[in-house]
Image (cartoon, helix red, strand yellow):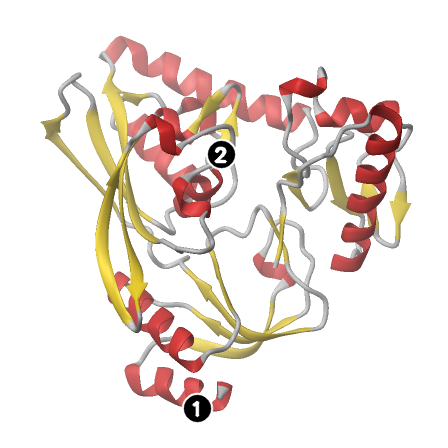
């Protein structure tokens, strides 16, 4: 069936490769190969590729920046669909909301870094906390990414997406509704009724010319904080577990109090500098990371009685 799907993609002129190495595609630098790696060049190809993969009834996974993922070891016997080419940004200084916000629309594969840079150059404020966040707009929206006490939902206005009714894709728009969102929760996480994001629109505020220096300085400050915390020292997927205020302490601190910082299994290690980071010291596998995740969960459960909730996604 995969060979037939490959021939269909070739006829439709949708770019793809076979047995594509996955490790270089992710910030964790972990993973084997994808039997098919599909890179649609526009929204129409994205929809067509997804329809074809679903109709072929093979496993598939959609990625953006792959900054929160752990690819499997060995060969993924299905299709990885990358949105990396879907990165256009749209903006009109004439279009405002009732509260005077300006709207910036990004295609789903737009790197968060490109979105923040666009806002900075247009002198728009509201996205500074996301400076330095790896990954794509679609991924940040799906996860409701949170940085420095600000969630992506705090600036979310609407999103275009499609879902399937049988074999037919239905195009829809979802507007911001506070009841749909929570800490690292979004309406796109419902696996029973999957929604495939094509673009997202965010609310920003126009800043004065005098404020641009402050916007740039804030972006640099948040990036510097990430560097100081060791976010970029080693390949990783950032925070492994969600924080839970009911636990009385961040997940990293609980893991640290269990004496697990620095623990290694294979090539994976609970970072010596941050209890909620697992890093790839050079040759880590998905199995190594899974084993460390389980060790941390078991230790925190035994010592504190809390169940840590994993934030990273194992493909």
192 to the left or right of 241:
left
Residue closest to the far left: 94
Residue closest to the far top: 210
Q: Is residue 261 visible?
A: no
Residue 31 is tagged as: none
Query: Residue drawn at (77%, 52%), measured in percent from left and top?
Result: 290
Task: Give the structural element (helix, strand or loop) at label 1.
Answer: helix
Q: Nearer the viewer, residue 40 or 208?
A: 40
Counting from the top left corner in percent of width and height, residue 146 is at 51, 28
Quarter of the image containing the C terminus? bottom right
Residue 30: which quarter of the image? bottom right
Q: Is residue 285 above or below residue 223?
A: below
Q: Is residue 214 above or below residue 202?
A: above
Q: Nearer the viewer, residue 142 or 147?
A: 142
What residue is disc 2 on? 145
215 to the left or right of 145:
left
What residue is disc 1 on? 4
Counting from the top left corner in percent of width and height, residue 240 is at 68, 39
Query: Residue drawn at (63%, 18%), measured in percent from left and top?
Result: 245
């Amino acid at each position: 069936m995969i060979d037939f799907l490959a021939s269909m993609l070739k006829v439709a002129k949708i770019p793809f490769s076979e047995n594509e190495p996955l490790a270089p595609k992710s910030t964790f630098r972990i993973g084997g190969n994808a039997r098919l790696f599909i890179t649609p060049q526009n929204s129409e190809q994205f929809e067509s590729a997804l329809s074809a993969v679903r109709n072929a009834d093979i496993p598939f996974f959609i990625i953006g920046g792959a900054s929160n993922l752990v690819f499997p070891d060995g060969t993924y016997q299905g299709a990885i669909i990358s949105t990396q080419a879907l990165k256009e940004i749209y903006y009109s200084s004439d279009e405002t909301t009732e509260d005077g916000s300006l709207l910036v629309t990004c295609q789903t594969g737009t790197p968060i870094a490109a979105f923040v840079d666009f806002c900075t150059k247009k002198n728009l404020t509201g996205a500074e906390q996301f400076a330095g966040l790896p990954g794509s707009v679609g991924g940040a929206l799906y996860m409701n990414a949170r940085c420095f006490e600000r969630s992506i939902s705090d600036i979310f206005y609407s999103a275009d997406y499609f879902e399937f009714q049988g074999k037919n894709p239905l195009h829809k728009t979802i507007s911001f509704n506070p009841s749909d969102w929570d800490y690292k929760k979004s309406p796109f996480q419902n696996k029973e009724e999957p929604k495939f994001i094509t673009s997202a629109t965010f609310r920003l505020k126009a800043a004065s010319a005098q404020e641009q220096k402050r916007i740039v300085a804030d972006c640099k400050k948040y990036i510097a904080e990430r560097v100081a915390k060791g976010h970029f020292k080693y390949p990783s997927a950032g925070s492994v577990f969600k924080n839970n205020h009911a636990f009385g302490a961040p997940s990293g601190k609980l893991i640290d109090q269990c004496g697990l910082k620095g623990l290694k299994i294979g090539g994976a290690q609970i970072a010596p500098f941050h209890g909620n980071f697992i890093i790839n010291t050079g040759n880590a596998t998905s199995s190594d990371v899974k084993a460390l995740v389980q060790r941390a969960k078991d230790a925190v459960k035994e010592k504190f009685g809390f169940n840590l909730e994993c934030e990273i996604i194992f493909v």
